[in-house]
Image: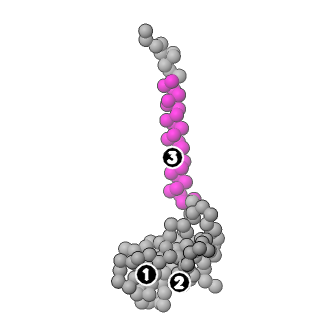
Amino acid sequence: MQPSRKSVFPFIAGAFLVVLAGVITAWILSAKVINGTDKAAPGVTATSKEAGKLDPNVKYDTASGVLEKGGINGEGTYHLSRNGGSTAKDVALTSSTVDLATFVGKKVDIWGETISSTRPGGWLMDVAKIQTAD
């Protein structure tokens, strides 16, 4: 006995609607990520003057300078220009918790953990907190 077309149609229409709802949901979520509405990790404070959160159980390294876009010799996504010229003193920066882009071109103080650098004498830091210098 073959099922009638009338009894199969609701299942096909239901399956189509489920797939359509999934596609629309994925599109909305991907647009949110692409537009960058999630700038900082959950629980991290972010204002125009500072961003990040320090863990009281971690000993952080600190540095000051002008934040610039682009790493140093392939390390980091940003770098901290220090002492006005010698790149040997600059710090390559990366951060998985803080959006550094809003501080580019500003004199800042940073707190973070030093990561092994592949360049001789280099300094690579994972930034936990950044604050504009007064």
Q: What's drawn in magenta, residue-wise?
A: 11-37
Instruction: Indicate left or right for 31 with 45 as reference.
Output: left
Look at the image and tell me in which quarter the C terminus lies: bottom right
Which residue carries the number 2 mark?
63
Which residue carries the number 1 mark?
123
Residue 68: tell me if it is visible: no
Residue 12 position within the rendered picture, expressed as x and y whole percent measured from the top left? 48, 25
- Specify the farthest residue to the top: 1
Residue 118 position within the rendered picture, expressed as x and y whole percent measured from the top left? 35, 77
Image point (50%, 56%), residue name: 34
Q: Work out how far the residue at label 2 is from the one at label 1, CA to CA, in angstroms.
A: 11 Å
Evaluate if marks 2 and 1 touch, with contact meaning CB atoms under 8 Å apart.
Answer: yes
Q: What label sits on residue 27 in the rendered view?
A: 3
Among the two numbered marks 2 and 1 on one chain, the one whose residue lies closer to the N terminus: 2
Residue type at the position of mark 3:
Trp
Q: Work out how far the residue at label 2 is from the one at label 3, CA to CA, in angstroms.
A: 41 Å
Circle 2 — which element? strand
Residue 128 position within the rendered picture, expressed as x and y whole percent measured from the top left? 55, 73
Instruction: Indicate left or right for 39 with 76 as reference.
Output: right
